[in-house]
Image (cartoon, rainbow, N blue to C red):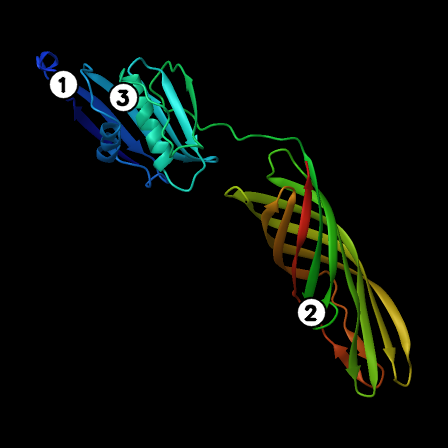
Amino acid sequence: MRRWGLRIAVACATASACEREVHAEVHVERAEGADACPDAAAFAKRMREAGDLPDLGTRSIEVRFERSDAGLRSSVRMPDGSRRSFTDDGPSCDGLADATALAVRLALDLAPAPAPASAPRVAAASAPEADDAPAPPPPRARRASSAEVSASGALVFGLASPTAAGVRAGGALVFGDERWSLGITGLALPPRTQSVGDGTVRVSVLGGGLEGCRREPVGRSVMLALCGRVEAMRLAGRAEGFARSEERARPLFAGTLLGRARARVAGPLAVFVEAGAVVPFVRERFAIDQVGVVYDPPVVAGATGIGALVDFE
């Protein structure tokens, strides 16, 4: 954290106003993540660019720039102890710096002027402050719990065959602070045919389970999540063209740890991509009489997917 103090020399508008030297002292502090905002010298320059400074008397003002969940934020501690705060969700600090400089000029009884055109997204609030402690960051807006439904294509490696493509669908309840979700998920891998000698083997997977996620917003439209799944599935295989052709089905239980990145497209619609590791609780090998083991699955399988979801608030 860096802090600068600057005594701004005040120019007199008339000869009678120059009977004594007058200064205004402005301290500028930039917290971590607010390096794009002006330091004391650059901030003083912005104040001078707004017009000549009249006789002010000795004043002391503290300015702090910092980053918050809503974007960049500034707070100004006035000579009378009151404090004004500003937030800006724009890509740069220019609008926030202009609005903050204007607030300082107005606090020093300078000529009033309209808010600068370069800061259309800046919102301001003022409140009296009893001590010198920095103003707390604005509270994160909370909303009621919402629901999500999703659908995606899925590509699974090593679960029932070396590679299998299918579909996945699910629904989840998102808790009020958007940090956690809990829901159900389903997976369908249609039969995939593999040639083995003079015959063929067809394997399919169908099932689903529970999914819980820890979510972290990144910016205004991107969300990252770490999720865990527990699923119960039906693993079915059919052998044809051999001395004995038959069909078998067995339960398959597996746990999955995956990462997901989601980006909002428009309104409640978002797209996502995910990838994870699938660990079957029991490995099911495929073997055929007089042929031997057809497929020996790995200890850890892989799964990826890409799809879309709708958020119902």
Residue 267: x %, y % from top left: 63, 41
Residue at x-position 89% and y-position 72%: 247
Q: Nearer the viewer, residue 296 or 303?
A: 303
State the residue at coordinates (69%, 52%): 229
Residue with the mark numbered 1: 12
Q: Secondary structure at mark 2?
A: loop
Q: Residue at x 52, y 41 (%)?
A: 220
Q: Quadrant of the C terminus?
A: top right
Residue of label 3? 61
Q: Secondary structure at mark 1?
A: loop
Q: Badges 3 and 2: C-beta atoms under 8 Å apart?
A: no
Asked which quadrant contains residue 92, the reply is top left
Disc 3/disc 2 C-alpha distance (Å): 65 Å
User: Which circle's residue, 3 or 2, is located before the other in the chain?
Assistant: 3
Q: The N terminus lies in which quarter of the figure?
A: top left
Residue flagged by tag 3: what amino acid is it? Ile
Q: CA distance from mark 1 to mark 3?
A: 20 Å
What residue is shown with label 2? Answer: 158
Gap in angstroms between the C-alphas marked 2 and 1: 80 Å
Question: Mark 2 belongs to which amino acid?
Answer: Gly
> In the image, is 253 to the left or to the right of 238?
left
Mark 1 is on which residue type? Cys
Q: Residues within 10 Å of mark 3 (few under 14, many from 20)?
A: many
